[in-house]
Image (cartoon, rainbow, N blue to C red):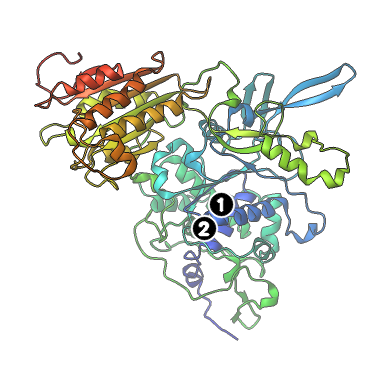
Amino acid sequence: MVTEPPDPAADHAADPAADPARRLVHALVCAAAEPALTGVLLFDLEPGLLDPVTRLFTGLLTGAAEPARTGAAEPAPAPVVLGAAGRDEDLWTRTRLRRDAHGITFRTEPGPLVDADGHPGPPPLVVVPDLPRLSVAGMRAAVQLLGADVAVVERPGLRRTVRPRARWLAVCRAADAGRLSRHLLDRFAVRLPVPDLALPPPEQVLAGLPPAWRTAAVRGVPPVPVTDEALTRVQDLLGPDAGVRRELALARLARTVAALDGEPSAVAGHCDTAARIIGLTVPGTPPGPEPGPGPAERPSAGTTPSTVRTRRPGGERRRPSPAEGTLLETGPAEGIGGGPGGTPAGGGTPFPEDEPAGPRDATPLRGPGRRTSGPALARGPVIGTRRATDLRDLAYVRTVREAAVHQRVRRADRFTIAPADLHAHVRTGAPERVLTLLLDHTCRDGDWDWQDSLAPFLQWAYTSRATVQVIEVGAADAKDELRAQSFAARSVLDPQVLAALYRAAGRASPLAHGVELAAHALRRTFRQHGTGPAEAWLVVVTDGRGNIPLRASHTGRLTGTVAAAGVEDAVEAAARIGAMDRTRLHVAVVDPAREPYGDLPFVLADSLGATVVEGRTGAGGDDER
């Protein structure tokens, strides 16, 4: 028998905030029980744990572990998974085929985000495996639905006012949070870092929950009042610079914690527990009334099911026996820390966007301009497959493979493809603007900064949300100095683009190979008819002194005398770009005005069919020749 003094403060201090699994379970129960906490955002979750967490959240929403419903639980609906390919047409509406007396007709119905409105059963679950890669349409949908009491959907063929019921579960790397919109992040009321999460099987976790928590996760909790002391505590925990949405989120989480404990109102102790759940450091329990005692099987405020202690008639406490079903094995109490309010309690912070690691996109919720001609569904690179709703853009290999699985069951004389076997491609959005930069690091002197010359092109790429292809020639830290290096970036805000502008110069200049890589990149961009960008820029910054022949770049060996072979190969490779379609492609060569051989950039520009832009300030002449 283990006896401990009845110290309520010890109960708060023993709260297992250092265990990400207990915090996560407590947070998911609160999100399932309270409609105001519909969004759960997990930072630095291991990809392999996304499926167990999804099954755990689904089990809470459907009541799979509720004793009163054992054997009769609602069927778990398939989660709605959102990614980079989500479009407004796929999220808000869906087209159904109907057969009536006049033949087959089409009908527009609510899409997966709003189709549960007005229907009985558990709320649907929306899963976002990588929030920074979520499409702009998906981000806008999250901003509109998360935490909203009413949403109005107006799409072609559908106009409806709905009450959002779906719960959202999103995952994001803490390092990428600074690139997201604050409007989007603030919509997730429950946010917690889980970098070191070790989650038991979801079935075991569900079985170890208190019965009151299982019931509350399905049927909800009654709203309880929040005291003025609790509101003051919320402001102290978050600090003076916290926004209203953060304060509301923490207050609602504290109110839900109090309701789960069966308390008549939320006090400061519940705010401390809510802060520990999302990973904030609690400086200390303020003086004030402690949460009142509840039933013996109910966890006290500031504890999780695994730390519940029940009182015996003699006044001593005992730990629950294994037969009573604990959530997780209780370990030794660990200190929470005593930093100021808002300081992370180890393992990260729920607000990593306050200190972004790189530049932020000014308009993250605005999508790039798109052309409307042609079928939009057939644009962009293929990123997966899904069941087909029409006969456009079919994935033939996946369709045949799906049909082959059922041939033995169908027992047909010939190979048969049923409508259920049809699968179509899932494509990410094709970029409408592309910027290709060819940077020759050997042409940059210590007294010349080429960023001033590149600023107009970088500004165009930023305002038009263009993708960027960077080709580097002559870098000092190149893996192979005989070859050019290239990488692709989603925008000019990518840290790789900024690093490329400051790279030190090396000895070799494989300019011919760089021009060849640029030609290949542009050819891939314009290869397929109808899917190429509406506008593309190729900007070449070089003095034209290529001292590595193209053959040496291909073979990786430099033999014999180079002479002018590198320059001649660069001009010949540039001629292939000069023959491309100029209705969508624009080419510019930035002249660093280096002597001798100051005419080489103009020779290269003639072969490219490019405009020459004066790069060095004060070199004389017009800005553009």
Query: Where 151 sits versus 558, above or below?
Result: above
Residue matched to label 1: 255
- Callout 1 amino acid: Arg
In percent of width and height, residue 281 lies at 40, 59
Q: In the image as oriented, which residue stretches furthest toward the front?
A: 560
Q: Amino acid at mark 2?
A: His
Q: Which residue is mark 2?
A: 270
Up/down of 605 relative to 16, above or below: above
Element under disc 1:
helix
Is 80 placed above or below 518 here?
below
For label 2, the crowd category at 10 Å Cα-Cα, with few meaning under 14, some 14 to 19 and many 20 or more, is: many
For disc 1, the neighbor class at 10 Å (few under 14, some 14 to 19, many from 20) is many
| Mark 2 touches mark 1? (CB < 8 Å) | yes
* Residue 297 visible somewhere in the drawing: yes
Whether residue 162 sits left or right of residue 268 in the image: it is right
Residue drawn at x 88%, y 40% is: 412
